[in-house]
Image (cartoon, rainbow, N blue to C red):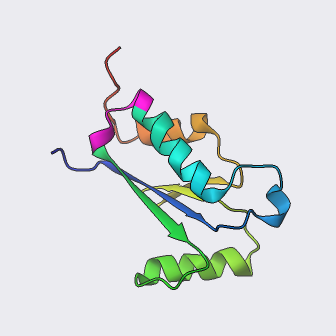
Amino acid sequence: MVDEKAVITVYGAEQICASCVGAPGSKDTYEWLQAAIGRKYIDNVVGYNYININEPQADQKHSDFIERIFSEDLFYPIVFVNEEMVAEGIPRLKTIYQALDKYEIPLQLK
C-alpha cells in the first residue's frame, strides 16, 4: 500500500446547517467526495476522516476546531485537505481538486 499523500477531513453533523437548508448533509458530502475523488485520482494515496461536530473528540486538534466552528458560526460541512481548509458550507470539487494537485496525487488512467 502506498503512503497517504493527502487526507481529506470533513467536519459536519447529522443535522443540516441552518443556513444550508436544501444542501446535502455532511455525511452525504463526505461519501460524495470519496466517490468523486476516487474517479479522478488514484485513491489509495488519499485518506478520509469524518468528524461529527456533536460528538466528543479524543484528538485535541479536532476539539479545538469544533469550538472554532461554534464560536465563529462557520457553515458546515467544512472540508480540509491536510491542514488547509478548502471548503465551508457547500464544497466545490474544483477547489478540492486544486488542493489535491498541490500534493501531486496521481490521476486515474483512462
13 horizontally vs 96: left or right: right
107 horizontally vs 98: left or right: left
At a point 80% along the width and 56% down the height, the residue shown is: 20
Predominant SS of the magenta segment: helix
At a point 44% along the width and 84% down the height, the residue shown is: 60
Residue in the foreground of this view, choosing between 15 and 96: 15
Q: Residue furthest left?
A: 1
Picture quarter containing residue 78?
A: bottom right
14 horizontally vs 81: left or right: right
Where is residue 88? Give x, y as percent: 67, 56
Q: Is residue 61 above or below residue 43?
A: below
Q: Is residue 42 magenta?
A: yes
Q: Residue furthest top?
A: 110
Q: Is residue 23 above or below residue 16?
A: above
6 horizontally vs 86: left or right: left
At a point 52% along the width and 48% down the height, the residue shown is: 31
Quarter holding the N terminus?
A: top left
Where is residue 4? Give x, y as percent: 27, 50
Q: Is residue 41 magenta?
A: yes
Quarter holding the C terminus?
A: top left
Residue in the foreground of this view, choosing between 20 and 93: 20
Where is residue 28? Give x, y as percent: 60, 51
Q: Is residue 35 above or below residue 70?
A: above
Magenta range: 39-44
Report the number of numbered marks: 0
Q: Is residue 101 above or below residue 14?
A: above
Where is residue 5? Give x, y as percent: 30, 48
At a point 61% along the width and 79% down the height, the residue shown is: 54
Residue in the foreground of this view, choosing between 87 and 49: 49
